[in-house]
Amino acid sequence: QAQGTGRHLASLRTRTHRASVLMPRIAGLSRSATVAWGASAEHASLLATGTVAGAISDSFDTTAHLEVFSIDLSSQNSDMSALGSLETSERFHRLAWGTRGIEDGSLPYGILAGGMVDGSIKIYNPALMIAGEGAEPLVASIEKHTGAVRGLEFNPAVPNLLASGAGDSEVYITDLTNPSNPRLFSPGTNNASSTSDIACVAWNRKVTHILASTAHNGMSVVWDLKLKRPVINFADSSSRGQRNSVIEWNPDVATQVLVASEDDLSPKLQIWDLRNALAPVRELIGHQRGILTASWCPNDANLLLSSGKDHRTLCWDPASGEVVCELPAAGNWTFDVKWSPRIPAIISSCSFDGEVSIYSLQDYPSPDRNGLDCQQALSRPMKAPKWLRRPCGATFGFGGKLVLFNAAAGSKISLMDVVTDHAIVSRAHELNSALETRNLNDFCERKLSMASTARDAEEWRLMQVLCSQEQRQHLLTFLGVAEPAAAPPPPVASQVPNADPLPAVTDDDPAAIFSALAVETEKQEQQDALLSESSENTAIAQTGAEDSASPLAALTPAPHDPMLSRAVLNGNFESAVAMCMRAGRVADALVLAASGGPDLWVATRDQYLQSNTTPFMQILSAIVHQNFGSYVANSELSAWKETLGLVNTYASAEELPALCNQLASRLEVETGDAASATLCYMCAANTHKAVELWQAHYAAAVSSGSGDATGPLLDLMEKIVVFQEAAGTREGYQMVSDKLAEFASLLASQGCLPAAMGYLLQLPVTDPTGPASTLMHRIHGCTEGLLAEPPVYPFEYVDVGVAPVLYDQSQTQYQHDPQYQNDSYQTDGYPAASQPYDPNWGYAQPQYDSYNQPQYDSYNQPHYEYEYSNHQPEQHVVPAPIPAPLSIPAPVPAPVPAPMPTPLPAPAPAPPYQYTPQPAYNPTGAAPRQNAYPSYVPTPTPQPAYNPTPTPTPPPVHVPPPAPAPPPPPAPSYDPQPVIAIVQGLIAKCNAYNLVDPIDKRKLDDVVKRAALLQKKLTTGEVSAGVFERLLPLCQALAAGDSRTALDLHVAITTTDWADNGPWLMGLKRLIELTAKLNVTL
């Protein structure tokens, strides 16, 4: 009883309650025959048939034949071509086709073995049958067994070994090393008490020296050829008298074996695991009568065929015990079914109705064919067969990912980062490093050294000028009109002659010493007198030379004019100037006009300038009258560099951009010189025109047939990014939004996701479904840490409804229990159910400026924030309605604009602010930076009352009892009030301006939210003391108007403490930008 209970727990009895899908027949023969497939790969389409014992044809023909056929699987014809035929004296119980002799070529088609009804084993050479040259195909005849040979199989690993089983439990191994002289030996002595006819033998697919046999008395034996004895005997103790017909090894598991019963009372297939041979681990029950044959697929252990006396042939999944498909029913018993060992999915079936049929498992019909309904389609295989599975594979994924798998790794996959274009990554890294360190000068120098064309070299040289501090001075050098540096004066030679050394004297003669001193003193006096006389003569000569070289000395005295003298004596300077101008005495006229008052001086000067039309006088007139617009309009375009140098030197910073634009427009329209026009537009900081000409230039380079568009795209984006950084603008990104999205996609494909996201954030989201929004959504899905909140959903929202479900008690309880009806749920990475989706704007949109950058290895930067970010995309926020109960679909609300707070009144002294674009360069340089700032605590401006639109009252919700309040946070070790007061004061002053730009308004709103977060963290002590030590001087610098120092301190904080302070640091960054733009101080 205990053994029966254990077997019940170990068994899995599965019956087929679903309709089966029938496979179509692809080929066939009208014969009652057993078959064997060609064993080698080159002969896989061959099929041998032998007339089966126990059957007779309609014509009562008693002859037996061995035939070889060929199957053409590529043809639609179901007929099989006969290659050879041989009449035999006896009929067959089994046929086996081995590969012996194929490798050495002695037997090109291998050998055929037949288990005959008279107990003999016939060995044939199929090559001679196919050749048909009259030679005898019979190689040997083994007369050892006493009963009919029903078990016959070649060893798949050792092709010269043939196992056979017959009556009286006889099992023999035949060595066909020499097929014409076979040798037989027994695997061992069977100690079983009773003997019976062997029904089947099978070699283990994993262990080559293991053989199994099963007999009609229900006993199965496993033989070990090395030990030459049986290692285990097993039988189903609960089914005494069971008649076994088949034994098959699992192709993948060496210890699992299948036994089939042909007993009509228990038609079942049993899977045994020899590690516990007390009972089968699984039983497959689906046949109504005894099972005659079974075959385990050699290419997939999850497929098993069985057929029997009920005329059915079923294909099982042994792992689940379910029938996956069924062959068409035969008109009589199906006694032989086999998988092709070399062609996956091909099956042969032989039945006593005189038919040999070939089927393909992959050709079973789909639900829309042959009138099959959906219920029938459910019996299709739930997983692909092994021969359709890839043993290994690799695929590239988004973000420079490569996914690998192979059979050796099992279920594990390998995910790796792959850079396919190191040049792109290197150039992006160099550009990012230049932006982070603000070392654009060196970056321009490198690009200049690598420039391939003269135009690129000139543009990068000018870019280097625009990124410098002394732009106007360096621009003159760039244009080639700078004044050469003065040569240093020659060194002045000493006028004192070298004194002769004293004569050598000795201490032995003191008188000689004094005599020598006297002589030397006299010589020194004579030399001093000569030197003094020479100096006086040189001074007189120089004075005479200067007098003769003076321009005044060269002037010829004007003749005396009494009328002119009289006019001067009477103070009539107008008349005197007129006389001098008529007489050509311009210098005298200008001297007299200077004494006659400013009006007379201006009139005389203008008269003189108009009297001479030389190019130099035109330049002088433009400088004197400051009429550079007229000069640029009439200047020679061939000398555009001189014209640009003139306006660069003398024009004011306000009018310089317009003059550069005027000159560039003339160059572009009148001469078609786009390269020179681009340089002038760059000097004017005209991003629109410069980007337009760059884009046209690189588009022409791509269309000229260079092939690769990556290089021109990188060149274009590098120029745009660096130029906008120098010009202090971001308007160029919108012009090349498609190129920017392409550039970001290129970076993302190489794994540079933070850099790609940084560029995408420069674009306003004008098209939520455009390529930029789609790419941003993909990058966020790949690395969610880059943004504080998910971006807009870029795909179309379709309500697919709710699928019908069967009645479930737990579901009913969930629908009727009030405590569940008002709960909202939230999935990872997406808004809660209370935030509806709007087709125009998506879910409640995040602030894209929340660019929470983690540390990443590709650029070795702890904080990735683009300092040149002025315009960040913003999205409308849709107010969230109250969620409906889960059992009733909630209506989709219409978008409701969020109410805007009333702005504070502007203070009386502050006029309305109007933003003026900054010039490309500033000749005066930056103001000196202060080292310390006073601690300034302004009085915050009171905020107006804000009454949002009331929302409908939600239905009552079951609220659990509140948890005990957490302990109050510890007080900070610093005084946060100075920082809070400065931030609030700056926000109030910025809010007092009438901001025209909607982006600035959204920025200010976001600053208010993040400032509240900063205030909370400061009051609760969540901001560390080290961060506060740098935060306080940052706010003091910002209050004093020194945005440069404030930005440097901000970068220092973000570099080391971004992880804990990222949200409020981003708000502080925007506050710095707004105060710098509006010139707000406290």
Image: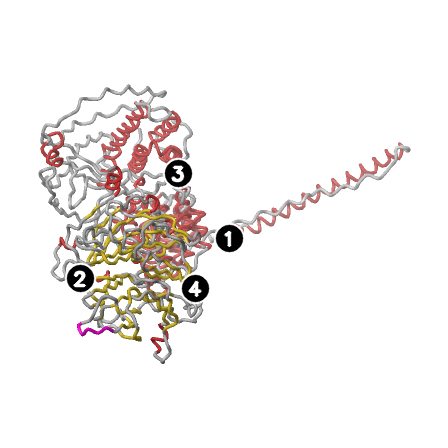
In x, y percent, where is residue 241?
Answer: 24, 50
For the question of whether residue 838 can be seen, the reply is yes
Mark 4 Cα-neighbour bin, 10 Å: few <14, some 14–19, many ≥20: some
| Residue 61 forms part of the magenta stretch | yes
Give me the C-alpha separation between circle 4 and circle 3: 78 Å
- The kind of residue on which mark 1 rests is Leu
In x, y percent, where is residue 434?
Answer: 41, 45
Mark 3 touches mark 2? (CB < 8 Å): no
In x, y percent, where is residue 196?
Answer: 30, 55
Question: Start and end of the magenta stretch?
Answer: 58-62
Q: Is residue 178 rendered to the left or right of residue 238?
A: right
The residue that disc 4 covers is: 183
Q: Earlier in the sequence, mark 4 or mark 1?
A: 4
Where on the picture, by quarter, is residue 871? top left
The residue that disc 3 covers is: 862
Give the SS element for disc 4: strand
For the stretch drawn in magenta, what is the main secondary structure? loop
Q: Which mark is residue 555?
A: 1
| Nearer the observer, 456 or 845 | 845
| Nearer the observer, 140 or 257 | 140
For the question of whether residue 679 can be seen, the reply is no
Q: Which mark is residue 328?
A: 2
